Image (cartoon, grey):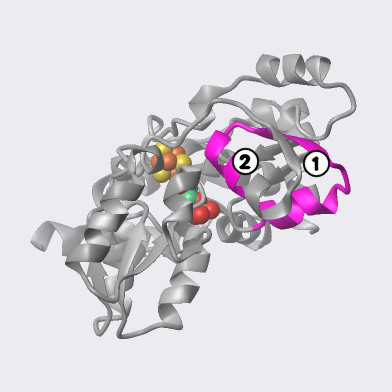
C-alpha cells in the first residue's frame, strides 16, 4: 500500500508539471482506473477524449493500438505508452498487405476495420468501428456485403444483428475467445437470477447464451441501471473489479479471463513514463493521415 500511495502522489505531481492526462481503459486495474485516471472508458470514449483534450501529454493506460489512435487524432500532443509490449491478439492478426489482398479479392466491397488494429491497417480501411458503434457503422454504409476485419466473432455477431453479409478475417481476442456457453449455463445453475452480459468479441454461441451484449461502456451502463442484481460480465477481469468499487450493492459473479497486455500497465510504469517521457508513440505522417480519415469517418457517425 505504501508503494501504491507513493506512486499515486508522484503521478499526481507529474501530471500537473507536464500538463498531462491519463486515459484509462475499463480493463485497467482499480488502482489505476480509480486513483490516477483522468478519463475512463471504452475504446470509443478514449478515442473521442484523445481528440478533444488540450493536454500536452497523453498517457495511454491501455494497449498500443489505443495509443496510436490517440496520436492519430491528436498529432500535436506527446502520446506515451508505459509499456511498448502492451499489444493485442486482434491487432497482431492482420497487416496492411492482408487488407490490400482482401480488397483485390472482393472489389468494391467496403472495408470496416475494428479499432483494435495497427495504424498501417487503419490506413488501408474505409472506416473504423468499435464494439460500441459497429452496428451503426456497418448500417451506415448501405451495402448488403461488408469486409469486416479482423475480429471474426464481432463480425459474425454484427451479421446476426443486421442481416448484412460479412466477409471476415480469422482474428480473435485471446481473452474473449476462451469463454464457452457451457460455462455460462453452469454459472446460471449455480447462481439463480444471474444476469449475463457478454462482450461482442465473444464467440456467437456465447453471445446467444447471454442476456445482453455490448461494449465495455454499454455493460457499465447496464450495471448502473440494474444495481442490486447478480451479474456475470463475460469479459476481462478488471471490468467487474472496477464496477464493484462503484456498485457495492451489486453482486459480481466470476469467472473472468485476464488480458496479459492490459496488465502490463502498472502504477509504477505510469510514474516512470511521466518521469522519463517514455515510450513516445510516433507515426509516419502519411500513414497517420490515411488512418485518421477512417477513424474520423467513424467518429462522425
Ligand atoms: P471496448 O472497451 O471498446 O468494448 O473494447 C474492449 C476491448 O477488448 C479493448 O481492447
Ligand atoms: Fe486485445 Fe482482447 Fe486484450 Fe482487448 S482484451 S487488448 S481485444 S487481447
Residue 156 lies in the magenta-colored region: yes
Q: Secondary structure at mark 1?
A: helix
Residue ID for mark 2:
155
Helix, strand or loop under label 2: helix
In the picture provided, is 235 more to the left or to the right than 189?
right
Q: Nearer the viewer, residue 55 or 1?
A: 1
Asked if the magenta segment contains residue 205, the reply would be no
How dense is the environment of label 2, judged by Cα within 10 Å: few (below 14), some, or many (20 and up)? many
- Give x and y (percent) for residue 72: 67, 41
Question: Residue 212 location, x and y as percent?
Answer: 48, 65
Give the residue pinned by disc 1: 293
Q: Position of residue 98 (x, y in %)?
A: 67, 17
Q: Which residues are magenta?
A: 133-157
Considering depth in this image, is 114 or 105 the residue closer to the camera?
A: 105
Identity of the residue drawn at 40% across and 82% down? 226
Pointer 2 residue Cβ closer than 8 Å to ligand 2: no
Q: Along the polypeptide, which appears first: circle 1 or circle 2?
A: 2
Q: Is residue 19 above or below residue 84?
A: below
Residue at image point 34% right, 44% down = 180
Q: Position of residue 275 (x, y in %)?
A: 35, 46
Marks 1 and 2, how far apart at CA: 22 Å
Amino acid at each position: 500500500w505504501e508503494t501504491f500511495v507513493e506512486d499515486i502522489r508522484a503521478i499526481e505531481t507529474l501530471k500537473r508539471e507536464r500538463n498531462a492526462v491519463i486515459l484509462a481503459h475499463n480493463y485497467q486495474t482499480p488502482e489505476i482506473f480509480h486513483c490516477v485516471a483522468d478519463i475512463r472508458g471504452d475504446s470509443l470514449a478514449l478515442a473521442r477524449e484523445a481528440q478533444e483534450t488540450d493536454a500536452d501529454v497523453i498517457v495511454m493506460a491501455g494497449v498500443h493500438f489505443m495509443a496510436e489512435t490517440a496520436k492519430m487524432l491528436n498529432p500535436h500532443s506527446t502520446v506515451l505508452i508505459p509499456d511498448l509490449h502492451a499489444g493485442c491478439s486482434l491487432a497482431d492478426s492482420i497487416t496492411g498487405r492482408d487488407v490490400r489482398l482482401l480488397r483485390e479479392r472482393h472489389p468494391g466491397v467496403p472495408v470496416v476495420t475494428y479499432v483494435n488494429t495497427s495504424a498501417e491497417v487503419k490506413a488501408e480501411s474505409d472506416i473504423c468501428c468499435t464494439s460500441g458503434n459497429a452496428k451503426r457503422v456497418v448500417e451506415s454504409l448501405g451495402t448488403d456485403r461488408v469486409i469486416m476485419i479482423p475480429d471474426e466473432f464481432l463480425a459474425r455477431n454484427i451479421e446476426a444483428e443486421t442481416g448484412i453479409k460479412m466477409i471476415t478475417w480469422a482474428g480473435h481476442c485471446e481473452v474473449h475467445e476462451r469463454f464457452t456457453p457451457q460455462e455460462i449455463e453452469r454459472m446460471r445453475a449455480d447462481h439463480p437470477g444471474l444476469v449475463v452480459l457478454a462482450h461482442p468479441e465473444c464467440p456467437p454461441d456465447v453471445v446467444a447464451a447471454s442476456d445482453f451484449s455490448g461494449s465495455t461502456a454499454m455493460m457499465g451502463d447496464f450495471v448502473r441501471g440494474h444495481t442490486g442484481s447478480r451479474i456475470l460480465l463475460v469479459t476481462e477481469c478488471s471490468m467487474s473489479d472496477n464496477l464493484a468499487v462503484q456498485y457495492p450493492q451489486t453482486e459480481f459473479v466470476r469467472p473472468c479471463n485476464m488480458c496479459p497486455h492490459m496488465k502490463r500497465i502498472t502504477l509504477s510504469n505510469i510514474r516512470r513514463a511521466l518521469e522519463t517521457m517514455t515510450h513516445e508513440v510516433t507515426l509516419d505522417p502519411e500513414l497517420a493521415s490515411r488512418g485518421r480519415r477512417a477513424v474520423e469517418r467513424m467518429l462522425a457517425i
